[in-house]
């Protein structure tokens, strides 16, 4: 599936989930930039998430990068990743201070944490 097909799929998801208002997007600019995996009880390989203003993004990892599309609110970030032509939905919870993205694993019950690479919180990360 090409990125433009993912855009169509994400548009359908946005419409079906009652798309956020334009005013919320400006208030939620806290997301734009690069976030790094900081804490991971499941010991996954370290990666980073690059969120772009236009709703696109990139999962940056040693095994190769993965494009994604995103939408966000104050409480959640929704990704639609292009994994070898398949659209994979991923949902993050957002901390109250908007300084952490939390990824819960239904499989293990654990929660991984991402922080902005320009945040003071990076110094506290256990993954280096």
Image (cartoon, rainbow, N blue to C red):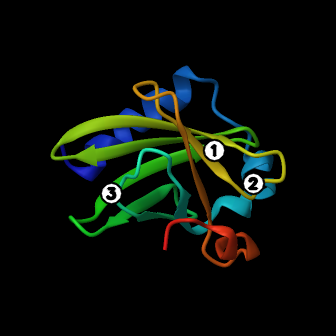
Nearest to the observer: residue 58 or residue 6: 58
Neighbour tally class for label 1: few under 14, some 14-19, many 20 plus, Cα within 10 Å: many
Q: Which residue is mark 1?
A: 72
Q: What residue would you read off at disc 3? A: 67
- Residue shown at the point (45%, 37%) measured from the top left: 90
Q: Which residue is mark 2?
A: 28
Q: Is residue 68 left or right of residue 74?
A: left
Q: Is residue 69 left or right of residue 38?
A: left
Contact between labelled residues 1 and 2, with CB atoms less than 8 Å apart? yes
In primary-sequence order, the first of circles 2 and 3 is 2
Q: Do the numbered discs 3 and 1 sit on residues whose CB atoms are within 8 Å?
A: no
Quadrant of res 114: bottom right
Mark-to-mark CA distance, 2 and 1: 8 Å
The correct choice, above or below, for 97 with respect to 5 in the image is below
Residue 55 to residue 104: above or below = below
Q: Position of residue 66 (x, y in %)?
A: 29, 58
Residue in view at x 58 percent, y 64 percent: 53
Q: Image quadrant of residue 59?
A: bottom left
> Is residue 61 rendered to the left or right of residue 79?
left
* Residue 60 picture location, percent across and down: 36, 67
Tag 2's secondary structure?
Answer: loop
The residues bearing labels 3 and 1 have C-alpha atoms spaced at a distance of 17 Å
Q: Residue at x 83, y 45 (%)?
A: 96
- Mark 2 crowd level (few <14, some 14–19, many ≥20, 10 Å Cα): few
Q: Quadrant of the N terminus?
A: top left
Q: CA distance from mark 2 to mark 3?
A: 21 Å
Of callouts 2 and 1, which one flags the residue occurring earlier in the amino acid sequence?
Answer: 2
């Amino acid at each position: 599936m090409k990125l433009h097909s993912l855009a169509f799929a994400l548009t359908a998801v946005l419409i079906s989930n009652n798309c956020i208002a334009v005013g919320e997007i400006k208030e939620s600019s806290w997301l734009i930039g690069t976030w790094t995996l900081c804490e991971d009880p499941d010991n996954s390989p370290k990666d980073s998430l690059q969120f772009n203003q236009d709703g696109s993004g990139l999962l940056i990892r040693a095994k190769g990068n993965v494009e994604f599309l995103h939408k966000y609110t104050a409480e959640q970030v929704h990704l639609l990743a292009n994994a070898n032509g398949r659209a994979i939905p991923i949902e993050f919870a957002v901390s109250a201070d908007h300084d952490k993205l939390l990824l819960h694993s239904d499989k293990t019950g654990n929660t991984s944490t991402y922080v902005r690479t320009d945040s003071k919180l990076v110094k506290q990360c256990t993954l280096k």
